[in-house]
Amino acid sequence: MAGTGHAQLRDRDDVLLRIKDLVVQFPAGRRRVVHAVSEVSFDVAEGETLGIVGESGCGKSTVARAIIRLVDITAGEVVYEGRDLAGLEGEDLRKVRPRLQMIFQDPISSLNPRRRVRDVIAEGLAVWGDDIGSWSRDRIDELMDAVGVEARYGARRPHEFSGGQCQRIGIARALALDPKVLICDEPVSALDVSIQAQILNLLKDMKRRYGLTVLFISHDLSVVKNVSDRIVVMYLGKVCEIGSTAEIYSHPAHPYTRALLASIPEPAPTVDAEEGDIGDELPSATDPPSGCRFHTRCPRATDVCRDVEPVTEQIGDIDHFVACHHPVAVEVRTG
Amino acid sequence: MVEQASAPAPLLSVRDLHVRFPTERGAVNAVNGVSFDLYEGKTLAIVGESGSGKSVTAKTLMNLLPRTAQVSGEVTYDGQDVRALAAAGTKHFFGVQMTMVFQDPMTSLNPVKRVGEQIAETLRYHLGRSRSEALEEAEELLEVVGMPEPARRVSQYPHELSGGLRQRVVIAMALACQPRLLIADEPTTAVDVTVQKHLLDLLDRLRRDRGMSMILITHDLGVAHGRADDVAVMYAGRVVETADARTLFFDMRHPYTEALLRSIPRIDDPVHHRLDPIPGRPPELIDPPEACAFAPRCIYAQGDCLGGVPELSGLVGLHRFACLHPTGTERGMAAMSANRAAGVTAAGLPVADSGGGG
Amino acid sequence: MNAEDRVTGKPKASRDPRASRQRLLWRFRILRLVRPSRVSDDSPAGDDSAVRRRLGFSFWLAVVWLLIMAFVAVCAPLLPMADPTKVAFSGPREPPSLDAWFGTDALGRDVFSRTMYGARISLAVGGFAIVFGMVVGGSLGIVAGYFRGRLDQAVGFVFFVLLSFPALVLAILITATFERSMLVVSLTIGILAVAPVGLLSRASTLVFAEREFVAAARVLGARNGRIIVRELLPNVVIPMGALTLLGMAVAVVAEGSLAFLGLSVAGEDAISWGKMIVDGAGLRDLQNATHVTMFPVAVMFVTVLSLNFAGDRIREYFDVKELAF
């Protein structure tokens, strides 16, 4: 959108997580606020992998952290299995925590350097009372085996492992509590090229093995395409485009999505290279542009974009929603 | 050992470069015999993962290594011995003839000085410009690198600029003395894709307009593919394959190049395409065995791969690779079939006997 | 120039490009220091002990001295020494001899035995004071750094009041009001240690609380108490613990200063190095019987030096280790 709207919310029974009009603001001093996430809505069906893609400052990580309540939600709903997580506090919140787990970007920073990796993986079980019983010992061995870290290294500390292995340990820790939803915040961007594929494949295997629903956040369009069933494109705290992965990549309708696809080193064949020329300057999130937030960099912007915020609208009757006054003409297809 | 392939003398020529860092755990062999040529007006991309020695190579060229580093080998720039120049403390060479742009622009920028002053300083020191001349020229340079509103930017501090704009300032500084060779070390790793495109376009344009040569150090194969004339792939401190970009990406010979290209997701792959990761992890650089460094991860590995380090074969300037069983050749096919039949490589890596084998 | 750069850490930007090169160099050196294991993607087979840094011979020398002093302090009554309180052991102000190694003081008491007994109070006061400072200041700092907000402001205010209040006045106030028992003297010095230790622990907590493993623990459902004890404490204790010996050195000296003001532990039985120095600090003693003050001063000096030296080496040792992540 850079816009608002709920057209993309699906009325289906298997929707596991529904984010509606989510707003996250941070104080920025002198009574100003950073509009990190502004009225974002989307949903995730059970067993689905939803990719959230956008550049730094688009709010994708903040959305993830808001869902998991690591940052405070200013307004809006995060409905998980019929309960609004946004309103939960204290013990009520703590009790749902095991259901939604997270994998972090920096595999080194996300492991406590003073603890043995076995204890790191077992932390969830220890918190919830299954202390060092034989049951949990088997469970830890099974998890270490599943993520490909040899159980005999369990007594070592994180700095003795490489980045890729630390990420595997982080995945095992997240899976220990048998979560329903796994939120992956840039899980491979800190890793070497040859290791990324190992972790991506592992995540896919874990998803199948443990029946996970995945929220996959990344700035890398190729990686997101590889793992996601559906995709949300975000810009400056707003949703630009939502739809099935194949649809978004083959018929990108939002000028920003097209700019992203045109900017990658080996551009997607569906866009022209010039569409990537949108200028360097990301507007300030403390004082976002009026109307459509993308209008300051958009090659198709007109007066209406400056004044009126676009609302997500469905393209034809397929799984493709765009928030733009002038979407790039795509022939209306029927699904 | 190696014959020259073509007549014109290269601008930069590196021969058998070795760099070792003594550490408490033993010497780290960061660069182990790297050789390449760079011709006037060309871009050479050096591609590799962390620990491959690509950045150390660049820093060696720029004489930026810590004193503890042990360097051997020849570096010739336009007929001059670069290491001798460095040892003699020659002024007006590094930063003038040859210059470098780093991944983090703040490495080269002084946070408490206006960006115009910083560019002007370079001009005053190396070219002896007066203060006012230098400031004027700084503004022009900012315009050349596509800085919006250059007149206003000269009096801004680095922290007032976005990452992309800072990198433009650094590029402007690098260009100030009209260098003939620009070394860009992961210049776009810290920025977003749309900004990355602009910066790479800018570097491309500047190189063409000014007839510069460029060494582009990157871990991103896509960047190398789109922006370089020649590509050198490094692994464990060695160049394992080098060729013109087209040949390297479409007719590669080294199994590492092939495996790396297969392991990365691409935008035109179908959704949920199963990736082909490289098994294992990069090798130790301390006391490496006398063997092909990639052998433990290579599905082609045979007994002879473990017997010694393969030489980079072929003519300088043409397609060269350091492999005894190159992919896409009969030897390679035979090695792969043998490994598939055995279910395991000579280095002990299990290989699935998939249908494609022989 | 190179040496200068390393000392000042941040060389000023000069127009000499060699300076800017040095600046880059300096950065690389730091980078290499910070991530030694990244040079070669570390394998789990990597041997832990190989990376471990050495503390050096002089460190161990200091430790041996401290161990001897600790042993003497603990076992003083069991050791074959003269009674330190017994008057007229062989006559007043005897110079050192085979009988009385350090000589005798104005009352004819054995200076050697008094110095050894003095280690008891000096080290106990020093040790107790710093432990008190660590426990109270450390926990306040962690709690303030983790919860932030109002609590942080309140704790910060207390710390700054403590720091701004003249230490000597506070010490005199407390020791004048209460009976000067060992506990009170130790507490007095301990209270003075709370603010500096607290600020340190707050600062390191702030750094670690930002790290993602704390977020991960919260996502797993760990309560705040568990996060503080399991995730933050082990990380914050290391830099603080490394400062224990340095803090103890300061506390031992502080006890000496209080003794000089006549405010150390009261009673004839309570011997401390500070009190011994005061005893021998009369003009006559200083002129004619230097040994009465010289020996306790020397032992105290070597002990404080050892504490500082060992403490500093430990701090360096862990700082580097700390940066390795």
Image: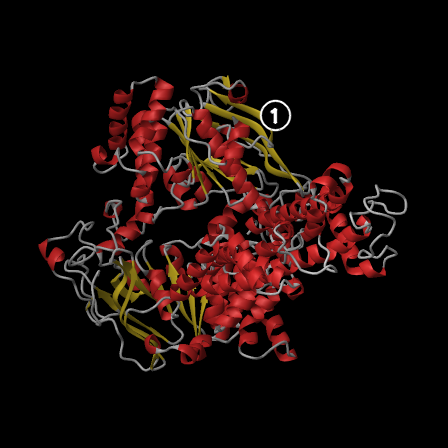
Farthest-out residue, left? A303
Q: How many marks?
A: 1
Chain of the residue where label 1 is placed in the rendered structure = B
User: Callout 1, which amino acid?
Assistant: Met
- Please name the residue shown 27% across and 25% down the image: B135
As drawn, the residue found furthest toward the front would be C284
Q: Residue at x 31, y 60 (%)?
A: A59
Question: Which residue is at a point 33% across and 48% down the rendered structure image?
Answer: B193
Q: Quadrant of the N terminus of chain A?
A: bottom left
Q: Is residue B228 visible?
A: yes
Which one is in front, C38 or A30?
A: A30
Where is residue B108 shown, x and y percent of the image? 40, 35
* Label 1 environment density (alpha carbons within 10 Å; few <14, some 14–19, many ≥20): few
Left or right of B3: which side holds A259? Answer: left
Q: Secondary structure at mark 1?
A: loop
- For residue A144, above or below residue B297: below
User: Residue A10 at what x, y percent from top left?
Assistant: 27, 76
Q: Position of residue B40 (x, y in %)?
A: 40, 24
Residue B64, relative to residue A27: is it above or below? above
A136 and A227: which one is in front?
A136
**Label 1 belongs to which residue?**
B1
Give the residue drawn at x 51%, y 26%.
C1
Measured along the vertical axis of the image, is residue B98 above or below residue C58? above
In this view of the protein, can residue B57 be seen by the observer?
no
**Residue B336: x, y in percent?**
60, 51
What is the image's colouring?
A: secondary structure
Position of C35 with respect to A185 (left or right) is right
Which sits in the foreground, A11 or A332?
A11
